[in-house]
Amino acid sequence: MRRIAVILSCLAFTVTAFANDDSRLDALMQRYQGDVPGASLLVLKDGKPLVSKGYGFSDLEAHVAAAPSTDYRLASVSKQFTAAAILLLAQDGKLSLDDHVRQWLPALPAVTEPITIKQLLSHQGGLIDYEDIMPADTSVPLRDKDVLDLLSKTDHLYFPPGRSYRYSNGGYAMLALIVEKASGVSFQAFLKARIFDPLGMKHTLAFVKEGPAVPHRAFGYSEEGGRWVRTDQSMTSSVLGDGGIYSNIEDLARWDAALYDSRLLSDASRKAAFTGWTATDDPTIRYGYGWRLTGDTLWHSGETIGFRNVIVRYPKQHLTVVLLTNRNDPEPYKIALEVAALYL
């Protein structure tokens, strides 16, 4: 009887612990609840979802609730897929990370001659920010090739390639164009054929106007004057390499699983992606290939008009938190860390 009593006591403790986690989780996610732009939250432990749920609304006007299947624009979380595409082509022998970028994109100005693919991957190329040189009267959303056109007219870099770090959206747009040149197919087609389809990421895509619609699409919002205003697209929203992928937490669970083994990327490719090649503006963070490294975590955030997202992986603990949101505030990285603390 004593043994049964001990077991029942342990079960009661476990139930109470989970209940406490639920209440603390709800408190952390409180701002996303109600009649507001929302979020989808995923917590994976040992490959199993401990949390997979939506909060608030993915479409305020149509009153569509956010759910695990809701697709959000990933913004810069897309960069890890761009980097993976380059690494796959390196595995195929179609390119080398030591290739000079102008070998693939000769339209770039002569000043970019020393820049290598690996320097673009780790933000050490020194390219001028294309957002700063796009015409003020731009009325048609830019594509990756338009970024190349803008950069082709520049005559200087921020620093000699490989000598420093400066986060570069334009660099990742160039990587998307290199994927197209090396593979012979569009960037979106390469991602679908080599990453999304093989992993069963059926609702993930690099979105282009002439292509398939985004399934279960979340629309972005910004708070203005105490009310939520739809701010879903900007003049840079159609650039794919730096931030044009839409996905949901269900598909990102499949992506996370593939980062633990060689089903997609080889051991060498994953090691390269997860190596901190350069210091960043924050002394606690180093940058790999599409990933930030901080202590025991691999992570990346994504911010664009109407969307803020983050994925935080703790590989040694086999824990991952993904928080996708269709709103400009709050910043989700801190929330994701607090969520992770509940399960570490």
Image (cartoon, rainbow, N blue to C red):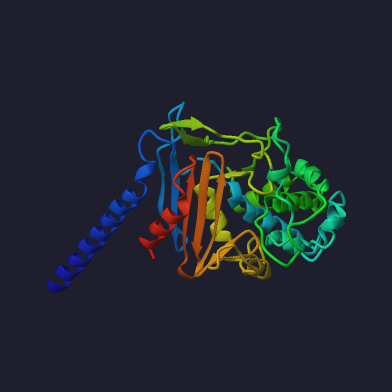
**Residue at the image position 50 percent from the left and 70 percent from the top:** 295
Q: Quadrant of the N terminus?
A: bottom left
Image coordinates of residue 271 in percent, x first then y, are 64, 70
Q: Write down the quadrant of residue 292 in the picture.
A: bottom right
Position of residue 343 in the picture relative to residue 285 (left or right): left
Total residue callouts: 0
Decide which of 225, 330 is in the foreground and name it.
225
In the displayed orientation, state which residue is furthest to the top: 61
Image coordinates of residue 35 in percent, x first then y, are 37, 33
Q: Write down the quadrant of residue 203 in the picture.
A: top right
Image coordinates of residue 20 in percent, x first then y, are 26, 56
Q: Quadrant of the C terminus?
A: bottom left
In the image, residue 141 above or below residue 86: above
Position of residue 42 in the picture relative to residue 77 (left or right): left
Q: Write down the quadrant of residue 8 in the picture.
A: bottom left
In the displayed orientation, state which residue is furthest to the bottom: 2
**Residue at the image position 70 percent from the left and 55 percent from the top:** 85
In the image, residue 8 above or below residue 203: below
**Residue at the image position 78 percent from the left and 43 percent from the top:** 150
Decide which of 337, 260 is in the foreground and name it.
337
**Residue at the image position 76 percent from the left and 52 percent from the top:** 179
Image coordinates of residue 301 in percent, x first then y, are 54, 53
